[in-house]
Amino acid sequence: MPGYTDRVDSALKTSTESSTAAATTPSAVLRGITKKYFKPDGSVLVEALRGIDLEIPAGQYCAIMGSSGSGKSTLMNILGCLDRPTDGVYELEGLDVASLDDTALSRQRGRRIGFVFQAFNLVSELTIVENVEVPLFYQGLGRVERQQRAIERLELVGLQDRLGHRPAELSGGQQQRVAIARALVTNPAIVMADEPTGNLDSTTGTTILELFDGLHAQGLTIIMVTHDDSVADRCQRIVRLRDGLVERDERGGRGE
Ligand SMILES: Nc1ncnc2c1ncn2[C@@H]1O[C@H](COP(=O)(O)OP(=O)(O)O)[C@@H](O)[C@H]1O
Ligand SMILES: [Mg+2]
């Protein structure tokens, strides 16, 4: 029978190995991803993505840029499991997404990914605490725990003194902070953002980008579609799309 030290050694080794494995599993691996939009008669209307190969390591802050119509939102929708590719392989944190039915897919999405959109997408009838609680409601959490976790996240984004307000009573920057709190409330490993500063003036946009810097520093994977050139200095990588293909894959200001 192995001695105490051997057992501790082997336990540590196992835990180190498994945590190393978890740390090195990429957040997203795309191989040969295409997306066609079809006409009602079945013919191809648009080939929005024409073969994307991309690997996004865990913890990377990656910007996706490119002119309007280049396929950024289509790619983000596929990465975020909001839509499925026409062809190709997508592994989300090692999980082959194509094999999942719609229910399983939305469960994985809810567990692994937080979303932030250009237009904030808050529910106007709900208070901001209730807005942040929504993803937890879908996970079946009880009211007390939902509220507690929502308030914690709102404190994190500096809105603890606005809890009972409704979205219309807040500025655009504050609304985007609520959306970020909502994206974080399920403790996702990945945050995906489609033009999060697109509706904000540049000063407010900067404060929002500072929040994303903080999330990156905590180890979250950030994938951000943006036209905002100031993101280039903050991110580690810039993937530029053109006509549904990766045109350039380059280092951002925080790249190694
Ligand atoms: N639901 C859709 N049906 C048909 N065509 C679409 C749809 N969504 C996007 N497209 C087309 O796919 C291409 C890529 O669009 P999109 O991914 O929205 O680009 P971007 O976000 O870079 O502006 C464009 O030509 C667009 O018109
Ligand atoms: Mg778009």
Image (cartoon, grey):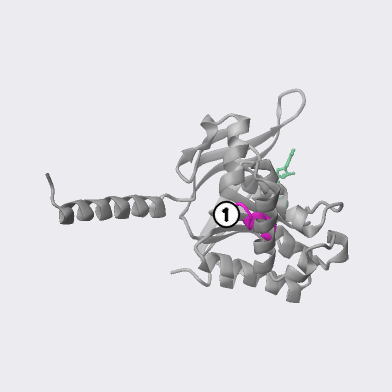
At 54% across and 33% down in the image, what residue appears? 98
What x and y, as percent, mark residue 173? Answer: 77, 68
User: SS class of the residue under badge 1?
Assistant: loop
Q: Locate the N terminus and report the quarter of the image it occupies.
A: top left
Count all numbered tags in the image, as a single digit.
Answer: 1
83 vs 76: above or below: above
User: Viewed as shown, does residue 14 lie left or right of 147?
Assistant: left
At 34% across and 50% down in the image, what residue appears? 18
What x and y, as percent, mark residue 190? Answer: 56, 54
What x and y, as percent, mark residue 223? Answer: 58, 56
Other-residue count near label 1 (Cα within 10 Å), few / some / many at <14 / 14–19 / ≥20: some
Q: Which residues are magenta?
A: 181-186
Classify residue 177 by image quadrant: bottom right
Judge whether residue 229 can be spotted in this image: no
135 vs 157: above or below: above
Most foreground residue, 77 or 211: 211
Q: Locate the C terminus and report the quarter of the image it occupies.
A: bottom left
Classify residue 222 by image quadrant: bottom right
Q: Is residue 32 magenta?
A: no
Most foreground residue, 228 or 249: 228
Q: Is residue 184 magenta?
A: yes
Judge whether residue 2 can be spotted in this image: yes
Q: Which residue is mark 1?
A: 187
* Type of the residue with mark 1: Asn
Residue at the extreme bottom: 203
Q: Is mark 1 within 8 Å of ligand 2?
A: no
What x and y, as percent, mark residue 11? Answer: 26, 51
Classify residue 160 by image quadrant: bottom right
User: Viewed as shown, does residue 212 lie left or right of 159?
Assistant: left
